[in-house]
Amino acid sequence: MTRLRVRYTKLGKIRFIGHRDLARVWERALRRSGLPIASTEGFSPRPKMHFGLALSTGFESLGEYLDVDLIDSTDAPQPSYAEEVLIARFAPLLPAGVAVQAVAVIERGKSLQAAVTACSWVIDLDGVAPTAVGGAVDRFLAADEVILERVRDDQVVEVDVRACVEELELIGACGLPGWESGTSIRLDLGTASPGLKVMELIGLLAPEATAHRVCRTHQWIEGAGSRQEPLAVTTASALAERQAS
Amino acid sequence: MDEIWPRLERLLPRVQKPARYIGCEDGAQAPEPQPEQVGWLLVYPDTYEVGLPNQGLQILYEILNEHPLSWAERGYAPWSDLDQLMRQEGLPFFSVDTHRPASAFDIMAFNLSAELTYTNLLNCIDLAGIPLRTAHRSADTPLVLAGGHCTYNPEPLADFLDAVVLGDGEEVIAEITAVVHDFRSAGRTGGSRVDLHRALAAVPGVYVPSLYDVEWDGPAVRSVTPRYPGVPERVEKRTVADLADWPYPRRQLVPVTEVVHDRLNVEVFRGCTRGCRFCQAGMITRPVRERPVQQVRQMIADGLERTGYDEVALTSLSSADYSGIAEVVSETVRSASSGRPVSVSLPSLRVDAFTVGVAAEIGRARRTGLTFAPEAGTWRMRQVINKLISDEDFDGAVESAYASGWRRMKLYFLTGLPSETDEDTLGIAEMARRAVSIGRRHTKGASVTVSVGGFVPKPFTPFQWFGQNTVAELQRKIGLLRDDLRRAGGVQLKWHDPKATLAEGIVSRGDRRLGAVIEDVWRNGGVFQEWSECFDIDRWTAAMERHGLSIDWYAHRHRTEDEVLPWEHLSAGLHKDFLWQDWRDALDAVGLEDCRWTPCYDCGACTGYGIEHIVASAVPPAGGSQGTGMSRPVAVPVRLVPSGAGA
C-alpha cells in the first residue's frame, strides 16, 4: 500500500461547500483520476481517504490536506506519482478554487489530524475600526490569561485560552481574491486543548465585527524548536498553481 | 458581469446551506453572450437541491447554449433566509452560473412540475424586479415563460405568464429564440409587447394566455376564445418524434453539494401507454418513444466516465418496460465489475417477478430498499384506475424480492380514488400484511413501509371529471388504515398531509380566477408550499374566502360531460371522447390493455400528430400480465427499431 499526501486550496465561491461535500467532490475526482485507489472492505466499499482538520463552511484555505491509500499492483505497471503529473491530472477534475498545490508519496505514520499542532490564519474584519482591533490585539498579547466562557452540558465553564494564540498581529489588506474590508489580522492558533476556534477569538477581540473572509494559510507540525508543514509547496508546484490561476 | 457575487458573498455566511447559491457544478457553463443573442434564465421554482437534478431544465440548458442565437443560465428559488436578506440589501434574483441579475436576460423561463410551487414562481418574478402581472410589463421587461407538466392547465397562472409551452421543449425553444431575436432586432417600442405576444402565439405549442378572452357562465367557463386572428383556437402540444435525435444531457451537471437524485440519469424512453387513469404524466406524454439501446449504452458509459458517479438511474415513467432493460442493466453492472462498482437504479418499477429479477441483478453493487406502487388495495379498485396488477403479480413480486435477499420494501398507494369503498381502502392494509407474511418465510426481519397519498384529479386524464375527496374523508380513510394496522407487526404506515392534497386539488383544475388566490397566499408568506414546515392550509382557505371562491366547487365537485373545462382550448392530443369513455369504463371497473402491444384505441396522441410509438420489442416484457394483453397476442402497430440502431 502506498500513501499519497495531497495539498490543495479552497478559495473563492467553493468555500461555501461543507466538509462532507468536499469529501464527495474528492471521491468523484479520485474515481475519475484512474489512480488505483484502495477501498474499504464490506458491504458498501468507499475509497480510503483520510482528511486533515476540518475547515468550517465559508472559510478559505491555502493549505488543506488529504491522504489517499493506493493499491500496489504486482502485475500492472505502477502509474507515475510524479508531482507535476498528478497536479496536471487533478486540475480538470476539481471545481474552480480547489487546486492541488503539492503531491508526494509519504511514509504511513500519524494521521494528519493528530500530527498538525497549529494553523496560521488571516481574517478580514468588517464593521470595525483598525485602531479598535489594534488595541484589542495589544491587550490580548499583554494579558497573562484570557478567560473564555463556554457552555458545556448546560454549565458555563471558564477556560484560559491565552496559550492557544501563538502569534497575533494587525495587518492591512488580507490579500484574498474578491471583496475585502482592509482591516485584517494574522495569527497562529494551536490545536491542543483547550483549543480556540477562530470565531471565538473574533468574539473576544472584536465582537461587533463580521468576519466575512477567514483563510487558513498554513498548517504546522511542530517539533523541538522547529516546525514544518505536512507538505510544503515546492517552487515548481507554486509556479504551476500561479499559472493556473 | 459578476456584479451580484461581491454582494452575495457577504450574505452567504448568514444563511443555511450557502452551497445552494454558488453554482460551480461540473458541466456548468459561463456564457459570454453576444449582443444579438437571446438570453434565457431557466428557473426551477424550488430549492437548489430539488431543482438542480431536473433533467428537462438541464436538456434545455445545453441545447440553448449550443444554439448560435441563444445562451442560457440557471436559477433556483432562494430559501426564505436569503430571500429576506436579498430584499433588505436590494439584491435581485440571480443566476448561479455567473451570478448575473435576472434583468440581464431576455427570458425568464420556469419549469412547472408541481402546483404547490406556484407561489414560489410569483416570488421569483417579484425578486427579479419584474412586474407580477403581464399587463403591467413593458416591451423591454424580460418575458416570463413556463413549461413542464403543470402547463397543461396554466389558467391559474394566466395573469403572470407571458407564454406557456405545451409538451417537449427540445425543438420549440429555438423557435421562441428566433421570435424574440427578430422582435429585438426590429427595435423595441413602447406598447409593442402585444406584437411580441402575437408572434409567440404563432409558434406551434406556445400558448399566450393574455391573447384569449374567457367568458363565464355563472361560476363555470363558457368559452375561451382568441382575441386576434392568427392566434390558434386550440393550442396543440409539441412532441419530439424520435428521442434518438436528442441525446441530452450530454454533460449532466454534477453539483458540489448534495441534491436529490444525486447520480447519473439516463432517460430510456418518454411517454407511457400503461393507461393508468390517475396518472397525468402517462396521458400527456404519449406516444412511447424509446431511446435506442446503443445510445443508452453510450450515454451510460460516457456519463459515468465524465461524472465520476457510481450510480446510474434509468429514467422513464416505467423503466422495466424498456425493451432493452435486461440487456442494459446486466451490461452496466458487469462492465463495472472489472473497474469500479456501479449500481443501477430504476425509479419506477413495475410490480411483477420479471422486474424483481432485473432489480436483483442491480442490487449487487449496493442494495437499498425496493419500491413498488400497486396504487390501490383491491383488484376491483386497480381495474378502476387501470393499474392492472393482479394479486398473483403482486405476490410473485414480493416473493421473489424477499427470496432474492431484500428485507424491506416500500409500497405506494393512493386513497380517495373514484368509487373507492372502505373495503378497497382496507385492502391496502391487507396487501401490506400479506407482503410481510410472505417475507417472513424468507427472513424474520421482513418489513414493509406503506406510503399513502391522497388522490388529486388532474387535467387531461379520465379522472378530470371526478370530485376529489374532502380533507375529512381522506383523514377518515387514513384513520381506518391506522387502526387496522395498529397491531400489524412489520408494517409502518406513512401518509401525505390531506390538507396539502386539498391545496394541490384547488389549483390543479382551477381557472383564471385562482390567480388572485395564488397571489394572496404568496403575499401572506405562503412560499415553499411543498415543504410541510412552510405549508399552512389556512392561508389557502382564507384567500379563497377573500376572493369569494368556493373550495367545494373547485376541488370536491364532480364535473359533467357537457361542462367546458378551463383547459379545453389546450390539447395534449387526447380526444375528449376517448377520455370520457375511459372515465365511464373506469366506473364500470373495466380495464384497458396497453396499446403498445394491443390494437389502437385512438386516444388521439399518435393519430392526431402523425407520429407513432417507437418500441424496439414487438412483444410485451415477460413475467407479468399487468395490462399487457398477454393472454391474447395480436399484431401491433409499432415501428420496429432493431436494438442497437441509432446513434
Image: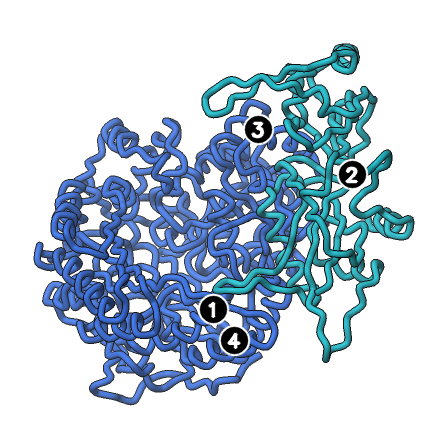
Q: Are labels 4 and 3 on one chain?
A: yes
Q: Residue at x 75, y 48 (%)?
A: A8
Along the line of sight, the residue nearer the viewer: B562 or B556? B556
Rounded to the nearest angstrom, the CA distance separating label 4 from label 1 is 8 Å
Furthest-right residue in this view = A235
Q: Quadrant of residue B614?
A: bottom left
Give the labeled residue for mark 1: B344
Q: Residue at x 60, y 57 (%)?
A: B64
Res B17 seen here: yes
Rounded to the nearest angstrom, the CA distance separating label 2 from label 1 is 44 Å
Q: Which residue type carries mark 1?
A: Val
Q: Which residue type carries mark 2?
A: Trp
Quarter holding the C terminus of chain B is bottom right
Q: Residue B185 appears at what percent x and percent y?
A: 66, 48
Which chain is mark 1 on? B
Q: Are marks 2 and 1 in contact (CB under 8 Å)?
A: no
Q: Single out the mark in the foreground, 2 or 1.
A: 2
Q: Are marks 1 and 3 in contact (CB under 8 Å)?
A: no
Say which colour chain A has: cyan
Give the labeled residue for mark 4: B332
Q: Which residue type carries mark 4?
A: Thr
Which chain is mark 4 on? B
Say which colour chain B has: blue
